[in-house]
Image (spheres, helix red, strand yellow):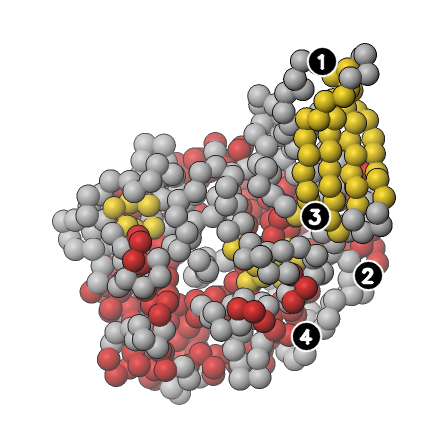
Amino acid sequence: MKTFLIGLFSFISPALFAQKQADNKAFCSQSRDESLTPIRPGVPGKQPFWNEKARMFKYAPSFSNKKPGEITPVKYRYSAFSFTDKKYYSFTDSSGTRSLAPIWDQLPTGNIYLTIEGISKEGYVYLVKDKMLYKAAVFCPPYPEAKYSYKDALLNGLRFLYDQNYIKSWYATGKPDHKEMPLYCYSAKVVASVINGMLLYNKYFPGNDSSLIIARKAADYLIAKAEPEGSPLAYFSQTYEGTQLAAGIYGNEILMSEPSWTGATLLNLYDRTKDKKYFKAAVHIADTYIKNQLPSGTWYIRVNKITGKPAAQVLCIPNTIINFLSVLVNKYGQAQYQASIETAVQWIMDNPIKTFDWTGQFEDVGANSQYQNLSHYEAGWFAMRLLDNKNRDSAHIRSAKELIAFCEDQFIVWEKPDIYDDRRGLSNEWHAPAALEQYHCYLPIDASTDQMVFMFCKAYEATGDPLYRAKAIALANSIVNAQKEDGKIPTFLYPFRKDKFWPNCMVYSLRMLEKMSTL
């Protein structure tokens, strides 16, 4: 379920950030003005409507509708009933797919029942759309200041992580303790987080050599358990181990995005140890990607590791693969991967950038058909890539800003909304501000919030818009305020699931805090 990005963010300039946020009412006005612009509105027969499964909006949405029966509408009546103030807000338009911009600024935040009616010249009325939706609060500071510094939060978190039995046991056994940490069943992701977590710990506590030993043993385990030479997916790290949780369902599959995280992690370890076996293992992973790349430029998202055949006819949005291969090219001079990077990037430009099908890719969720389970991760990662390459194409910043708006619109809560989550729990116990993960886990998650911090930082660097800076600080402060006294950063930022802890998510939070503490 939870995800993290390893060492793939470019440098964000110092002195541009401070931990204290601005109490600037101009941000409220700017946010409200921007919310009147719909995000990639659908056009019947031309541009798909991506938001049919969406429930919450900050930006004025537009929707597809049904054919109006036997009548020919000459106009459409839009009526939105607000459950907050018990009032109707209406307008008419010649189009049945107009955004709600004419009334959006008037509507209070809260639950809304929308109807769109087609009206013929004779006055006949036909219902073409009805939908419950939630208008969420836009960004409007002030938000709570952090209870202590990012650096203190980072160090407290590192101490907590190192002290966990499921981490320390690696030193003695050289293998994962599934009893102590059941999520080791998601081998590639969670074991890689042990490596990155211990590398980060060793950076700040260099006198403790055991952390580096743990990192090496975890890496050696991933390499030893990788798919054997000569197999269809040779050298790929195993996505699953054992039969716990989703491993019992998808155990024979490889989630094709995950070996790239392993490869990036092994490069991090190589940088620290200079042990060439880790670099060699990363190159082996890259070579297997090249061998399995489809002519279109991408890969299937789930592949049977025994047969090498797709386990589902759903394609991967290959951001993490592109980022991993780019590190090999740009940092280590492995130019042989450049052509594959370019075709993969072009696939994204030709597909989700056009369709806005930013379907989530998670190891504990099966492959989904279009628009059924959108997530911010893939859109956010690609937005950052576009910003990194803004000088190559003048349209990159415009596209990136639209992706950033999509992520915020669908997955950030600046205030606690009045909705039921996907587990039927009321959101009044959520920690906010925060970011939600995916439609199938529409809950505030620390790692999701972290990615939004990185994304807003990158956007501020590229555009100079201080609104992005303010958003990054508000979310980073929220993570600090969610941290427990013992240093633990909860994965689920609400009490009901406080014991459901993913260590890889916390490692991502620690990396975010490190970034923010140095700015």
Eye-nearest disc, 2 or 3: 3
Query: Helix, strand or loop at disc 2?
Result: loop
- Residue 303 placement (x, y as % from top left): 28, 45
How many neighbours does mark 3 have within 10 angstroms: few (below 14), some (14-19), or many (20 or more)? many
- Residue 202 placement (x, y as % from top left): 41, 79
- Residue 168 placement (x, y as % from top left): 34, 82
Which residue has dot 1 on it? 72
Quarter where residue 315 is shown: top left
Query: Helix, strand or loop at disc 4?
Result: loop
Mark 1 or 2, nearer chain start: 2
Which residue has dot 3 on it? 134
Eye-nearest disc, 1 or 4: 1
Query: Helix, strand or loop at disc 3?
Result: strand
Quarter where residue 140 is shown: bottom right
Per the model, the C-alpha gap separating discs 1 and 2 is: 49 Å
Q: Residue at x 24, y 69 (%)?
A: 220
Q: Are marks 2 and 3 in contact (CB under 8 Å)?
A: no
Which residue has dot 2 on it? 24
As shown in the figure, which amino acid type bears the numbered disc 4? Ala
Question: In the shown orientation, is residue 32 left or right of residue 350?
Answer: right
- Residue 431 placement (x, y as % from top left): 64, 67
Which residue has dot 4 on it? 146
Eye-nearest disc, 2 or 4: 4
Mark 3 or 4, nearer chain start: 3
**Residue 272 appears in the rendering:** no
**Residue 73 appears in the rendering:** yes
